[in-house]
Image (cartoon, grey):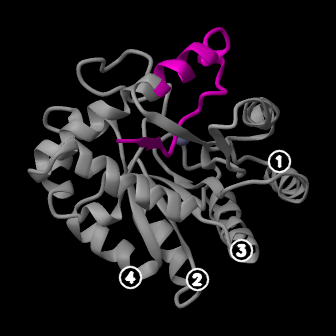
């Protein structure tokens, strides 16, 4: 039984003293591969340093929506430079976040649109961050209908209608993490309706630790806690969840 953490910021400041120990702890829990989503040029260097050092870490490149400001064009140029010089496994994380601020909404829409084009050009999956922005994200994706778009809606928190819309916009999977273990999140009822063939596991470390560690630092070795919750929701074994989600992750990121 093996797991893949499809969304983990193990290069973040929070892990600077013990990322190596956390990777070992993850391996002990059979979390064999970790996808590293990018944020912005402040941390791209750390991300690729970790990916160069650890063969179980797979880098993505992209500009995170909350990092979009007046300098987003320069940031996108940097993203393209990494695409030329490094092996990357996807474009992410990208998308729209109107929860923290709407000040740069127009720029966020432009940056998202541009990064969809990069994914298409390089035949890479998109890892999409959506916060209070499903309508806006759907609008942008609608412009690419019929094109070979694929990837993950990370930290999925929509309802079943949202999921059904996502299905029409590309070959998309949903990333399920700690939120599904939270009491009253309502996500369990939605996840029940989504086939395992469309789900990948993620931690979003260092954020969103699953129960019983809610509020603490999240780590990739917590992936089995999320798998156990999914198994319970879907009345299948943890091994079934591990098998399906690992197959999905391998096919999306080609690892
Ligand atoms: Zn993230």
State how far apart marks 4 and 2 are (Cα): 12 Å
Where does the image place residue 26, in percent across and percent down from the top left? 47, 25
Task: Give the label on residue 71, or none.
Answer: 1
Please tell me whether residue 130 belongs to the stretch shown in magenta.
no
Task: Give the label on residue 168, or none.
Answer: 4
User: Which numbered disc flags the more N-terminal residue, 1 or 3?
Assistant: 1
User: Which numbered disc flags the more N-terminal residue, 2 or 1?
Assistant: 1
Q: Quadrant of residue 36?
A: top right
For label 1, the SS is loop
Identify which residue is drawn at 88% across, 56% down: 77
Would you name the residue on which mark 2 appears? 148
- Residue 219 in sight from this viewpoint: no
Please identify, in this view, whether the residue under mark 4 or under mark 2 is nearer the observer. Answer: 2
Q: Does 20 sit left or right of 195 as displayed?
A: right
Along the line of sight, the residue nearer the viewer: 243 or 134: 243
Decide: marks 2, 1 in contact (CB < 8 A)?
no
Where does the image place residue 125, in percent across and percent down from the top left? 60, 65
- Residue 86 in sight from this viewpoint: yes
């Amino acid at each position: 039984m093996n797991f893949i953490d499809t969304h983990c910021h193990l290069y973040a400041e929070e892990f600077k003293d013990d990322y190596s120990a956390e990777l070992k702890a993850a391996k002990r829990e059979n979390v064999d591969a970790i996808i590293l989503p990018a944020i912005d040029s402040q941390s791209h260097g750390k991300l690729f340093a970790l990916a160069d050092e650890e063969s179980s870490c797979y880098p993505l490149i992209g500009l995170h929506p909350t990092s979009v400001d007046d300098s987003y064009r320069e940031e996108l140029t940097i993203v393209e430079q990494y695409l030329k010089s490094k092996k990357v496994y996807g474009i992410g994380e990208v998308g729209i976040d109107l929860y923290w601020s709407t000040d740069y909404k127009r720029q966020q829409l432009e940056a998202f649109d541009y990064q969809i084009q990069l994914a298409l050009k390089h035949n890479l999956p998109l890892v999409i961050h959506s916060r209070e922005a499903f309508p806006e994200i759907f609008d942008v994706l609608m412009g690419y209908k019929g094109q070979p778009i694929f990837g993950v809606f990370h930290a999925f928190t929509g309802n079943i209608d949202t999921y059904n819309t996502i299905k029409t916009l590309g070959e998309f999977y949903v990333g399920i993490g700690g939120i599904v273990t939270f009491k009253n999140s309502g996500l369990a009822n939605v996840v029940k309706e989504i086939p395992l063939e469309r789900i990948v596991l993620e931690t979003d470390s260092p954020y969103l630790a699953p129960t019983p560690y809610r509020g603490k630092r999240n780590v990739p070795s917590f992936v089995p806690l999320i798998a156990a919750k999914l198994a319970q929701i879907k009345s299948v074994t943890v091994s079934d969840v591990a098998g399906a989600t690992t197959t999905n992750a391998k096919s999306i990121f080609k690892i």
